[in-house]
Amino acid sequence: MKFIADLHIHSYLSRACSPKLKPESLYRWCQLKGITVLATGDFTHPRWFQELQEKLIPAESGLFQLKPDLAAVIDKDIPESCRAPVRFLLGVEISSIYKKNDRVRKVHNLVFAPSFEIAGKINASLEKIGNIRSDGRPILGLDSKKLLTILLGISDQAYLIPAHAWTPHFAVFGSESGFDSLEECFDELTPNIFAIETGLSSDPLMNWRISNLDKITLISNSDAHSPEKLAREGNLLDTQLSYDGIFGAFKRKKGCKLLKTLEFFPEEGKYHVDGHRKCKVSMSPEETIKRKGLCPECEKPVTVGVLHRIAKLADRKNPKKPEQAADYEHIVPLKEVIGQTLQVGASSRRVDAQYHQLLSLFGNEFYILRELPVKQLEKEGYPLLALALNRMRQGKADVSPGYDGEYGVISLLKEKDFVPTGQLALL
């Protein structure tokens, strides 16, 4: 069975996250986006854990669904073109801050469990170590290796995947507080790490410069802090709809396949290149090296981005796709594309109105972005959108890369495309 999974989100109980991140809203937005399996996020938080138990019921093995009475209320407002089954999988992001090899490390890891029983045992173990009640993403003084040891001691179906592995400040390979290899972080337990999350600022092509990652599956998720941010990245799988099927695909087991990851253009990520946000300075790795890592405006150290960090750890000059690696494709969130066609911000009311109109006409967001024939869009009166999506699918975009916490800008249209006669240049 082919389906899309997004396995890294948060709940309304995480800092700087939308109060709308509740099971009912997540169920709604999964249908609008085209997601079949969504991680719950934050299962270590007692309130969220209780809410999940109250609102979800078992579905396929290791997966859950919204209770029928709750789902029925939401379904009334879902366009017929978008209605589809939605499943939940128990997951959480854990922030580990600790000292190893004489350096302070700050690493975020994704943890998954196949049942509430096993998730509950994980919660009980972590509560003995630190505070899991103050934030949906708990911050613990817990070595990543120790966290993995705890999981292995509870269940061989409890998994750890390093989150947004290249993000400078909170990641296993981060330039500010990470490691130079998985082995340095997890020691003899490294064989239990079968996947990493590439994060918004990198894509598989960039990771394929590092031979030590050839046997590691590269996955992509939204890390959504609001329902509308779901599916800005995701995983297209062809496997059994089950917990074991999904992780079997990540482990590259026979009969389970990760077909491709759906990716941001990595330049749009907040930490793609080096820079200093306060001074509005972005720099290429070469410029950073030339300036000895200092901002040309204030002479303070810049934040070293993902492009630079990967180049530093790479042992290949050019990317080489591993034999069993999944494919990937770049996408731009539909509201961003619509905003470009209307020349307004993606959060404007005009964009929102057209977004829902498109979903009603054609189907979910992923279908429109990836599969809807552009000729059909033109026929229905959306020629600029057809042009923009055609360019996105071909990877033809002008980019202004993100740096030091500032998102990059992806432009799919040019000034000449907005011709006053209403006629449209093709490409």
Image (spheres, grey):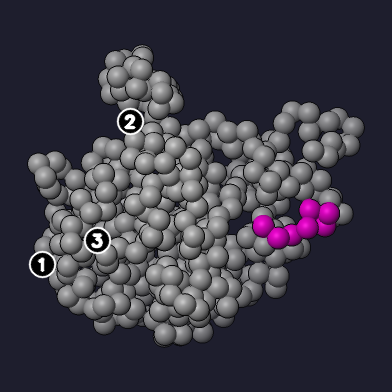
- Name the image quarter holding residue 104: top left
User: Is residue 375 highlighted in magenta?
Assistant: yes
Query: Where's residue 354, x and y in %?
Result: 71, 52
Mark 2 and mark 1 lie on one chain; the one further toward the N terminus is: 1
User: Is residue 363 highlighted in magenta?
Assistant: no
Residue that badge 1 annotates: 128
Q: Would residue 113 appear left or right of 402 to someone viewing this image? A: left
Residue that badge 2 annotates: 303
Residue under the image location 17 percent in, 75 percent down: 153
Q: Secondary structure at mark 1?
A: loop
Rounded to the nearest angstrom, the CA distance separating label 2 from label 1 is 35 Å
Mark 3 neighbour class, 10 Å CA radius: few under 14, some 14 to 19, many 20 or more: some
Residues in magenta, as a range? 370-377
Residue that badge 3 annotates: 190
Front tag of 2 and 1: 2
**Count of picture labels:** 3
Foreground residue, 181 or 270? 181
Q: Secondary structure at mark 3?
A: helix
The dominant secondary structure in magenta is: helix
Residue under the image location 15 percent in, 57 percent down: 142
User: Is 126 placed above or below 84 here?
Assistant: above
Residue type at mark 1 is: Lys
Residue 390 image label: none
Q: Secondary structure at mark 2?
A: loop
Residue type at mark 3 is: Thr
Front tag of 3 and 2: 3
Foreground residue, 275 or 280? 275
Q: Would residue 15 appear left or right of 140 to someone viewing this image? A: right
Mark 3 and mark 2 lie on one chain; the one further toward the N terminus is: 3
